[in-house]
Amino acid sequence: MTSAAAINQPLWLAIETKIAELDSADFSGKATEGTVQKIARSLDDQGYNVTHHAANLLMLRRAVDTRAKVGRPLMNDFTAAADALTLDDVTNPIQATIAFAHRVGADFPDVLDMDRRADLRATINGIRLDLLVAKANELGGDKGIRYLIENNVAESTIMQRLDIDQAKIDAVKQAIAAELAEIKRVEGLLKEVEGQDDVSKAKHLINKDVADESILSIAELGQDAIDQARHEMEKELAEKARLAAEAEAAKKAAAEGPKLDDISSDDMLGYIEDIREIMEFSDDPAEIATMCEQSNIPKALIEVATTNPDKLDELEAAAEG
């Protein structure tokens, strides 16, 4: 049994750490037994029960004998193997643990014991976390926080290792949620134009306010498709504007009625007769214009009646032939 003291390492790893602190001379000849006793007492002081625990003492003796046989401490291989690990190596912690055990256990077969597999897994997880945090610090800011979230690092660990608060994590999580929602929206929009060419798809997404970056990354359409879509849309908008202008001009022309030269003689005589009747009621140009408009008299004749009424006689004479 161990004491209530805090023990940060499993016993076998604590033993190997102590062995690594000693010189080769401590593992030769008669010095070996004294080395065992010295390490046992040191481990006892740390809270491990070694001196008075037969199994633990036997573990220590085996480790010392292996050190003497191999000629170097296990921790040399352990540290070298740990330092060589990259993020790619620890993507799958289970596989990484097995590979790590076989690498370190090449000359130290006790490392391959299944009883030590959980301890090695904890080591691999710790190394993985350190590598992830290092990468997050390299990315910096929100990108680093996002990186750890996406790699399933606990929020409490992220806050501790990056020295940030919950509000910062929440803000990044909201941004991630918004991006996921946009991905879902874009995927839905793409279904609406399934089977159409890339330019048509790009047009549809642009019209639905999808950013170019999302069109490239989510819809996986090329920049050339986006550029062509925008070019065609500009032409379509220009054509719509032209047609709208023509329609507005036609509407305005219809409201104003025909030009003087386009009014037939019979119609001209009828309009002039109506104008004269209106002038009998008022000589105010504004009132005359209003009553003429109400009688659907062409604007060209209304302008004559309100600005140059004497010209009405000339127009009337011309119409009579």
Image (cartoon, rainbow, N blue to C red):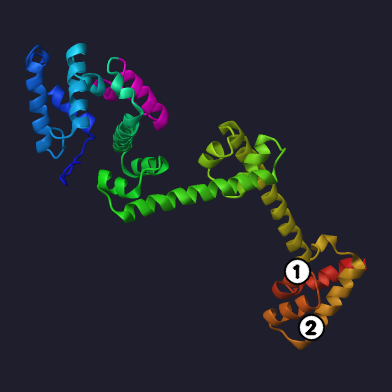
Q: Which residues are magenta?
A: 80-106
- Would you say 281 lies left or right of 62 here? right
Q: Is residue 299 above or below residue 147?
A: below
Residues 265 and 159: in front is 159
Looking at this view, name the residue that lies furthest to the bottom: 281
Q: Measured from the top left, where is residue 191 in percent x and y?
A: 67, 44
Residues 8 and 193: in front is 8
The local crowd at label 1, few if under 14, some if 14 to 19, many if 20 or more residues have their Cα within 10 Å, is: some
Quickly name the residue at label 2: 278
Residue 71 visible somewhere in the drawing:
no
Q: Is residue 305 above or below residue 136?
A: below
Q: Measured from the top left, where is residue 2 in percent x and y?
A: 18, 41
Question: Which is nearer the N-term, disc 2 or disc 1?
Answer: 2
Q: Amino acid at mark 2?
A: Ile
Quickly name the residue at label 1: 299
Residue 162 visible somewhere in the drawing:
yes
Q: Is residue 3 magenta?
A: no
